[in-house]
Image: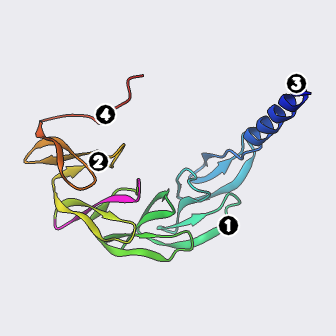
Amino acid sequence: MKKFVLLISGLFLFSLVFSQDYLARARKGKEWGAIKTDGSWAINPQFERINDFSEGLAAVKKNGEWGFVDANGSFIINPQFNDAHNFHEGKAAVKKNKEWGFVDKRGSWTINPQFENVKDFNGNIAAVKSGGEWGYVDGKGTWIINPQYEKVRNFKNGKAMVRKDGEWGWINTSGTYIINPQFPNAYPFVKVN
């Protein structure tokens, strides 16, 4: 009986994993679309650019503007942006005119365009550039670490790399240095084992 239950469980997990849809960006001529694993078109080539799918949507550029499509190629958010990132944590960074903000999967602004540059959300925190310096905001656009850095990286495991006065250091999510800026070049921490 145990073997039977294990066999059924294994088959269920196998079908769950392999029933997932996989799409790859592909170009034909000058237009981009997406293909299935058998090489057939899931989304016919029709876009100037297409990003990878993230959270069920892909950013696409059509007629010079960015919008978002589903896996069938249907627009969920019509093209209207100057630039767009993929969705992360339910929000996508988009550029309207010269400023960046964030939209939800319906295309509604969650954080109005107001930043010079942005990075994607990670742990409900996004790095944003304002007044020539980088800081961090929460999911509502409230500053949690005021702009004060020349360059930044996203938070990972509660730490973020920041550059101040030409040197890199690390801060925690409160903005307190855990390693003071002292390195002219550095890379994020990675797990050894």
Residue positioned 26% across, 34% down in the render: 187
Query: Which residue is label 2 attached to?
Result: 153
* Residue count near mark 4 (Cα–Cα under 10 Å), binned few <14, some 14–19, many ≥20: few
Chain part drawn in magenta:
122-131
* Magenta span includes 123: yes
Q: Which mark is first along the chain, 4 or 3?
A: 3
Residue on which the image places disc 1: 74
Identity, as a three-letter code, of the amino acid under mark 3: Lys
Give the mark nearest the N terminus, 3 or 1. 3
Contact between marks 2 and 1 (CB within 8 A): the answer is no
Q: Position of residue 166 (x, y in %)?
A: 9, 44
163 or 5, which is in the foreground?
A: 5
Which residue is label 4 attached to? 189
Q: Quadrant of the N terminus?
A: top right
Q: Are marks 3 and 4 in contact (CB under 8 Å)?
A: no
First in sequence, mark 4 or 1: give its number.
1
User: How much space separates mark 4 and mark 1, taking CA atoms?
Assistant: 40 Å
Q: Which-is-in-front pick, marks 3 and 1?
A: 3
* Alpha carbon separation for disc pair 3 and 1: 45 Å
Q: Name the residue beneath numbered marker 3.
A: 3
Q: Secondary structure at mark 2?
A: loop
Instruction: Point out residue 61 in the picture as x, y percentages from the top left corner.
Output: 51, 62
